[in-house]
Image: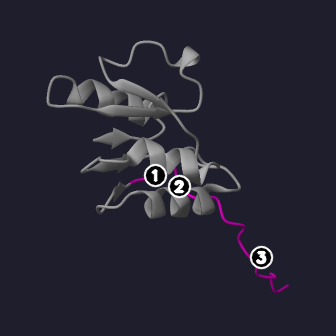
Amino acid sequence: MVVTAATGQVGREVIRLLAGAGPVRAMVRDPVAAGDLAGAEVIAASFEDAAAMAAAMTGAENVFLAGRDSPDYVAGQERALAAALPPACAMSSSSPRWPRARTPRSS
């Protein structure tokens, strides 16, 4: 199992819940800053680096896909899904922020 964004609020909790249930890889941008991730194997990769994500996911049977909200969110998630060979469980910890069209008010 690979957990992306493993240092975030959702990813860290998923790592904690999976502790002892089998091998878990924690995908993080900065392994030094990751701290304690409940015995998970820490792998350095980011949503911006497709090759590093593919390496992090090599051999994994499952992926828990979490990530941070950013202008590149959709493209990063698409890169992650392309790197994950088996189906991945995708989730968002926040709602997308799309610009809303304004409707003119009538007087």
- Mark in front: 2 vs 3: 2
Identify residue type, mark 2: Ser
Q: Nearer the viewer, residue 83 or 93?
A: 83
Q: Nearer the viewer, residue 29 or 52?
A: 52
The single residue placed furthest to the right in the displayed view is 107
Identify residue type, mark 3: Arg
Residue 52, above or below 14: below
- Mark in front: 1 vs 3: 1
Give the image location of residue 3, x and y in percent.
37, 39
Q: Nearer the viewer, residue 12 or 34?
A: 34
The single residue placed furthest to the bottom in the displayed view is 106
Instruction: Name the element at disc 1.
Output: loop
Q: Is residue 9 left or right of residue 86?
A: right
Instruction: Name the element at disc 3.
Output: loop
Give the image location of residue 49, x and y in percent.
62, 48
Give the residue at mark 3. 102
Q: Are marks 2 and 1 in contact (CB under 8 Å)?
A: yes
